[in-house]
Image (cartoon, rainbow, N blue to C red):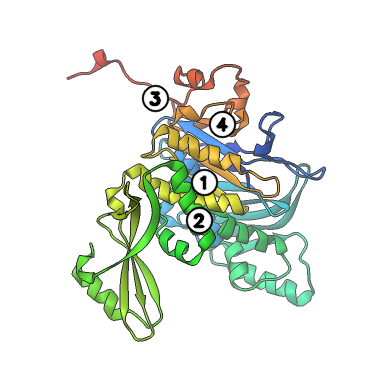
Amino acid sequence: MILRVVVRNLYSFKDETEISFVAGKSTTHCEHVSRAEKRDDISVLKAGIIYGANASGKSNIIKAVSVIQKIALGSVPKRNIEPFKLTALKNNTSKIEVEFKAGKRFYAYGVEFTIKGIVEEWLYDINSRTEKEVFSRRVGPEGNEFSFGTIDGNDEIQQLVRFISQSTPITDSFLSEYVKRNGKGLTAINNAYRWMKEDLKIIFPESRYEGISIRAEKDKDFALATKSLLEYFNTGIVDIRRIKVNKEDLELPKEIVNDLLTEAENNKAFVVASPSDSSTYFFETDENGITNIYKQSAIHRMKNGGEVPFEIDEESDGSVRLLDFIPMLIDLKLNSSVYLIDEIDRSMHPMLSQKLLEYYFAFLNKERDTQLICTTHESNLLDLNMIRADEVWFVEKGQDGASHLTSLAEYKPREDVRKGYLQGRYGAIPFFASINSLKW
C-alpha cells in the first residue's frame, strides 16, 4: 500500500510536492483503513481519488509512480524523464520517493536522477516514529558511494553485497542489481522489489488486458467472477470467449500473419493485438505443428436464449474500458494488491465509475491490504456517504505553471462536496476566459 509519494522537478511538479494516503483521524468509513496493529505501525487508506482540471497535473502523479517502479525494477527510463520546464533556472536532477507497506513492514524507497542515470538512491525501513537505513547510494565522479545499515550474514555475504554495490551501473538501480545477482543479507530489498513487481499495478487509459478470455478458460473461478461482473455492470455482454477464425479473416497485415505462422513452434502459444482496432488474436500450435487461431469476442444473448458473438470493436468504448477493469476487481477482491488508475472515468458513464468504486468498497476486508487510487473528473464520486474526505485530493496549477496538491480533509467539509467542488470552492476545476475577450 502506498503511504506517500514525493515528487520534485518532474513533469508539472517544480518544488518538492507530496501526496499522502496515511489515514487521518476521521471515524467515518472505518473499513476504508488498514489500521495500525502495533504502536509504531501506520494506518493507511485503502482508496484515493485525485481531482483536477485538464492539464492540471493529476495524471503526472500516476506517471511519477510508474517512473520509480521502472527504475526500481531495472533502469532509468530515459524517454519518460521530463524535468519541469517552466523556469529560467534549469535543474536537471529530478526526485521521486514512495513510502509503502509491503506485508507487515513499511519502507521508503527514493531516487534522484537525470536522463543520464541515477544520482542518489536509498531504501529505509520505517515506522511511525523512526527510520532505519537499509542502504544509501550516491553516484560521484569516482563511481558508487554506498552506506549500509545492518547486513545479515557472514563476511562472504557482506563482501558479495559490496561487490554488487560497486559494480552497479549508473543507469541501473541497486534494488534491481541486488535481486538480479541473487544478493543476500538485505531482506528489505527483496521485500521492496517484490512489492514493486507483483503488488503495484498501474492502468493508463491506453492499457489493455488482452488475455481475459484465455484466462477464463483456464480458471473456472475467474470465468464465473467475470460473468458475474458483466451482469452487475449491465453492458449487454454475457461472456468473453475465444472464437476460432481462419487466417484470411484476420484484421492483420498478411505479411505479419505469414511471419507469425512461419515462426510458430510446436506446443507454443502467443497473443497478438491488432494495431487497427481492439481485436486480440491467439495463435496456438499443437505438437504436430498445426496452428489454430482464435479471436477474442464479446458474447451477447438474444431473447430466445441464443448467443451471438460480437467483435470487440463493435462494443462501446466504455464497455471495452470496463473489460480492462474486471480482472482488477477480481484481483482486489482476492489478493493484497495496489492499483493506480489514470482517468478511471474515461469513456464510461458517470454511474459506471460510481458502481465500480461501490463494488470495490463492498468487498473490503481487514485481512487484505488492498488499495485503489485513481484520477478522475467525475464529480458524482464526491459523495461523503461513499468516501472519506482524506481520500480526496485536488490538483491545480499555480501562476508559475507548477502543480500543487490540497487534501479535501483540510477544508473540513460539512456541505454537499460535489456542489462545492463545481462552484470552485476547492479549486482544481477549469476556468475560462470571457467569450467577449476573443479576438476573432
- Residue closer to the observer: 429 or 120: 429
> Could one spot residue 13 in this view of the protein?
no
Residue identified by numbered label 4: 392
Disc 4 crowd, CA 10 A, few/some/many (<14, 14-19, 20+): many
Q: CB under 8 Å between callouts 4 and 1?
A: no
Q: Secondary structure at mark 1?
A: strand
Q: Earlier in the sequence, mark 4 or mark 2?
A: 2
Residue identified by numbered label 2: 224
Q: Which mark is residue 340?
A: 1
Distance of mark 4 from mark 1, alpha carbons? Answer: 14 Å
Q: Earlier in the sequence, mark 4 or mark 1?
A: 1
Q: Residue furthest left?
A: 440
Q: CB under 8 Å between callouts 2 and 1?
A: no
- Residue closer to the observer: 149 or 340: 340
Q: Residue furthest front?
A: 304
- Residue closer to the observer: 2 or 182: 2
> Could one spot residue 27 in this view of the protein?
yes
